[in-house]
Image: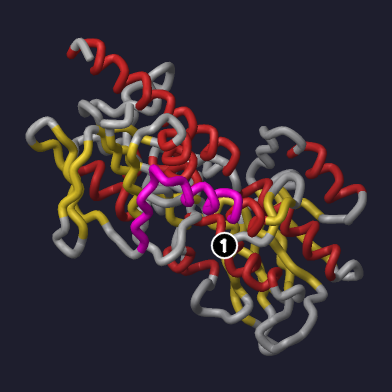
Amino acid sequence: MNNKNVIIIGGGPAGIEAAFNLANNDISVTLFEKESQPGGNVKNWAKLFPDFGDASVVRKELTDKLKHNNIKFLANTKIDNLKWENNNWVAITDKDEKHTADIALLATGFEVFDARRKEELGYGIYDNVITSVDFEEMYKTGKILTTEGKIPERIAFLNCVGSRDEKVGNHYCSRVCCITAVKQAIEFKELVPQAQAYCFYMDMRMAGQFYEELYRKSQEEFGVNYIRGRISEAAVTMDKRIQIKAEDTLSALPMKITVDILVLMVGIESSESTLKLSTDNNIVGPYGFAKSKSLFGKDNYSEKKGLFLAGTCKRPLTLPETIADGRSAAIEIINYLRLLDEELGI
């Protein structure tokens, strides 16, 4: 395998895990990352669900794998074009540099939904309306405070912002928002035990291992209040608090509540790079994600010869699923290259 090379676009968890496993099989890998540092969206989190593991430790474990001698990591390098040319894959950077390889792997990850698109919720309009990503940044400081520097007495978390929403065109579930809301509600209550925490939801989708247990723990040990219903409108009060209008769909009654901070649990969307490169290669699927050849058995393959997919460029995934999918992509690439060698009699 030492005469084979692979280009991987995206230095997040899936791309790094794939690169490391390919490198361990004597395959030369060039890994492109448009940001200055590897690790993808892991950098946005302080702790990870469901065990509250330190995200910085996980990120370091991932980035340490890039020290492998068979991996060439190129940061601050955006791929503007990816094409099949002369029986090779050619990646062209934004500096017009060309890189050629036997195989290309898209691991271009995701972007979080821009909550400004939901104007009725007030993000970017009212100071104390924040996103789940903003909450994590605040939590890293060890304090959750309003913009006026006050400790909140009431906080509300709203699920499905940008997911399962016909108005923004995203009908799918982002998979991670419900459990993130549970995690963040617990984190808030640990910091401010006397405060009240509310979580508004359509359905609490606790499908992962230990998710249901954590959901129950948030209620039984931390007193988090769960309200089945979506918030229709948020507005600011004279004292800079956030007034929420909603409906409790279990009782079929309208409700109004005032909180100090409203946290919007923003969903997962296709990244700009995923949309462009998959569109250019005619493998774009629903909602701008890259389309795999088959969910069953060929999920890391695309319809293009020698072009593979890994991680959340295909659909929303949790972090453990993303890392596992990176390993899976590496195995599929190794098997593919071996079959090519057998066909050529090498």
In percent of width and height, residue 1 lies at: 33, 26
Q: Is residue 67 magenta?
A: yes
Q: Residue at x 21, y 28 (%)?
A: 304
In percent of width and height, residue 205 lies at: 66, 38
Q: Inspect the image, locate mark 1, and give the three-letter code of the amino acid beneath it.
A: Asn
Magenta segment, which residues? 60-75
Location of residue 139 by image quarter: bottom right
Q: How is the image coloured?
A: secondary structure
- Neighbourhood count class around disc 1 (C-alpha, 10 Å): few under 14, some 14–19, many 20 upward: some
Horizontal placement of 245 versus 193: left or right? left
Say above or below: 305 vs 123: above
Name of the residue lying farthest toward the left:
86
Residue bearing mark 1:
44
Horizontal placement of 3 versus 206: left or right? left
In percent of width and height, residue 323 lies at: 53, 39
Can the viewer see residue 169 in this picture? no
Q: Secondary structure at mark 1?
A: helix
